[in-house]
Amino acid sequence: MRDGVTLYADIYKPRKEGVYPVLLMRQPYGRKIASTVSHAHPVWYASHGYIVVIQDVRGRGDSEGEFTPFLHEAEDGYDTVEWAAALPESNGKVGMYGFSYQGAVQWAAASLHPPHLTAIAPSMTAADLYRGWMYPYGSFDIQSCLPWAYQLARDGARLAGDAEAEAICTHVMQNPSAVLNKLPLIGDHPVLQTYMPAFFDWAGRSEDDEYWSRLNWMDPFLQQPIPALHIGGWYDFLLHGTLQSYAALQRAGGRTPELFHRLEIGPWTHIPWGRKAGGVDHGPEADGLMHLKQIEWFDYWLKEKRGNGLFEEPPVRYYETCSRRWRTADRLPDTADGEAAQRYYLSGSELPANGSLGGGKLTRHVEWIDESAAPDVFVYDARLAMPLSSVLPVDRSAQQDRYEILVYSSPPLSEALGLFGSPQVKAVCQVMDGPTDLVAVLSLVLPGEEARFLSVGRVEIGAAGGAEGVSGWQAVQFGLRPLAVRCPEGSRLRLELTGSGYPLLLRHPNGMSIRDGIHAGLQELNIAAVAVMSRPGEESWLELPVAEAAGV
């Protein structure tokens, strides 16, 4: 590297002598792994005519230097790309691939524009670490980041020969509730203080400040973009990062055979990219032939196989759940606005909307809102946070019996409804003893009453308390996690409103800002009450992004 530090890599070559392009992966978990939890082994890529370089990043594996997550990846990535381009038998063209951290390092390197970096394929990652990784819902992603910090600390402890610390990290990785249920969340973590102090920067910097601007590689990338193949999963915790990166390139405009980007989204978790995420069988075509898609991508750019039809294909391909079909689109919808959006209005009735047996309704017609119904109220006790452990398509019907949840259900659909994009929620609400969170969970009620999870979002409300801690009425609008689903005829849509979804979402302590939630101890967890109103002229609603995609 430019500062004299030596980084080590394994190099795989095709059997036949010749000149080949280079595929580079840089990772912090040990170069033998080579992202094989999601990608083919380097031998397979080499068999398709590529020199493959798998490198230990600074301070990991055999590489020299000190590892601080993300800190050196731009400069080290640049230097490694240029070194790889000059390898014997290299044709001078380098592509980068890999997922998660191995995807982030691609954005980092590309932000400095190494001359020989020709194309990238970042999978399940983010170019903007603040919005796309650490704070995807506007609050710190404690469920993913805290156990991951222990995973990174584990390797640091091993390199230091600290067997006790390594054992603690392994225990946390196997039992994350051991730290997720301990308050305060940012409190006593001596192993992290020693081996992964960066965690305290991530958790303690809730504002998008200068620290995070250095870890947002999209803006410099856009100054001199190169082709990027984005791969995401509907159930991946980094879905926001994948879609935000592609959306930024889409907004930049311009698509020519010399520069274009692609997006592929499958029915996958972070690990594995299989067919049965959440216990739902997504079908034998769920893998989407992603290994071959990557080879096709790099063949186009690194071997100049411009006749393989890649440019002529629609730039977006995604798996539509329930229908179990791959579909294509000309663009990724940023929001659910426009003529294709379908709006459902929330309505109370003679019964309170608490629980799925209550009187909460979703109606397509504003005039069908029950004007005589009282506002619906839920009480959120931060000491008993409502659980939401994942974004997997699990059955939430038992959870929806809880009275701490407002539940609004639509009539059965008269015909199938395809959705693709980010649902939006508007709520007219009032808070006692806030601020607090308003959490929205969308599910699909199938025949047989299974309520399959679809999406979730949150917003902080009630920041300005009035007399005796009661805020004024306020209207808030916020987006939910993007989705793609074919809602079958006869199914129903169901919206839950409550105050928490822990540990997926950071627990709001009530009575203080969510920014302080990471520091809250048991004594700082309080009770808040939230009223939701929906009347003509002051409607609360759910807006759905209707798909305009073609089947594959």
Image: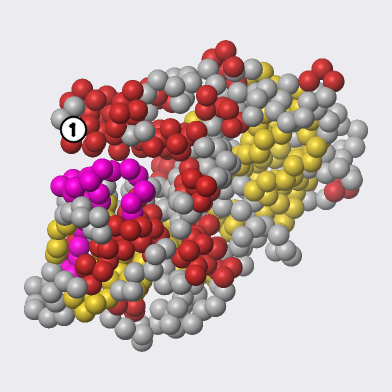
Name the colour scheme. Answer: secondary structure
Residue 503 in sight from this viewpoint: yes
Picture coordinates of residue 55, whole percent (x, y): 21, 56
The percent coordinates of residue 503 (x first, y second) are 49, 30
Residue situated in front as seen by the camera: 365 or 423? 423
Of residues 117 and 227, the one drawn nearer to the viewer in this rendering:
117
Residue 168: horizontal and vertical position, in percent?
27, 24
- Is residue 497 among the parts visible in the rendering? no
Residue at horizontal 67%, vertical 28%?
436
- x, y percentage for residue 345? 78, 46
Q: Which residues are magenta?
A: 44-73
Answer left or right for 186 relative to 481. left
Residue 302 highlighted magenta (yes or no): no
- Residue 449 horizontal side relative to residue 429, left or right: left
Give the labeled residue for mark 1: 160
Q: Amino acid at mark 1?
A: Ala
SS for dot 1: loop
The quarter of the rendered structure image containing the N terminus is bottom left
Label 1 packing within 10 angstroms: few (<14), some (14-19), many (20+): few
Q: Which quadrant holds residue 493?
A: top right
Considering depth in this image, is 336 or 30 the residue closer to the camera? 30
Residue at (43% x, 42% y) in the render: 278
Position above or below: 55 against 18: above
Q: Residue at x 30, y 74 (%)?
A: 116
The prevailing secondary structure element of the residues shown in magenta is loop
